[in-house]
Image (cartoon, helix red, strand yellow):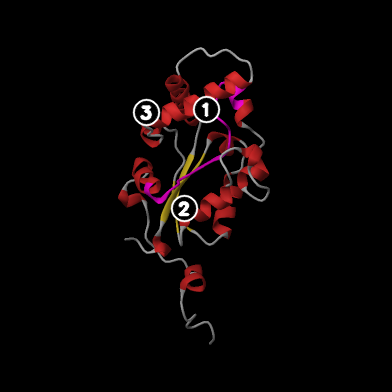
Amino acid sequence: MTHPKKEKTLVILKPDAVQRGLVGEIIKRIENAGLKLVALKLVIATEEQLWAHYQKDEAWFKKKGERTVEELKAAGRPIEKEALEYGKDIIRALVKFMSSGPIVPMVWEGNQAVGIVKKIVGSTEPLTSDGGTIRGDYTLDSYELSSLDARAVRNLVHCSDPVADADREIPIWFGNDEVLKYRLIAEQILYDVNLDGLKE
């Protein structure tokens, strides 16, 4: 079992974050929490990478599709396909969006990194994300608007959740030799039990 201090999480800055010049601001927010950046690159994602990344099963497609069908009924809009296909449309839209321009995959390490990043980023829908979170502060998209426009929600950041997803997702974007091991000076103040050596 990995020590909580060594937990890793995947963060991807999506095309909207890159295009809006928010890369530095988002990195700063995560760094300010005390997590350590151990991998970073700027890439154009392939469809194969994205389908592997957004790996979902039939039950997930059906559940999400049924929600879409209910929303269409409630809005008095026509239902044109099976729930399963509506569910698959969610991933199709994500793949199209995520491959539309450069993205910035990163790996962050530190105590309960997955939960810390999730808290900083905010809930998936920007409209309902709390103020003070990245999504709450920097974007105003909503599920309703993205559904009306038949596109993925533009919420700036992907972050792994739970830890098992991080373990599965990181190798899609980084080889073992690309995730660095090094000591960050700030780790002493964050993790050293006795704070030895602070006084001269």
Q: Determine whether label 2 and label 3 are within 8 Å by CB.
A: no
Q: Tag on residue 67?
A: 1
Quadrant of the rendered image containing residue 48: top left
Residue 96's x, y, as percent?
48, 25
Count how many numbered circles sit on residues in the image: 3
Q: Which residue is mark 2?
A: 114
The residue at the far bottom in this view is: 200
Position above or below: 31 against 193: above
First to last magenta residue range: 146-164
Q: Is residue 56 left or right of residue 101?
A: left
Which numbered disc flags the more N-terminal residue, 2 or 1?
A: 1
Position above or below: 51 against 161: above
Residue nearest the viewer, comparing 148 with 8: 148
Residue 10's x, y, as percent?
44, 47
Residue 164's x, y, as percent?
37, 48
Which numbered disc flags the more N-terminal residue, 3 or 1?
A: 3
Q: Is residue 94 left or right of residue 53?
A: right
Q: Is residue 149 visible?
A: no
Position above or below: 37 against 69: below
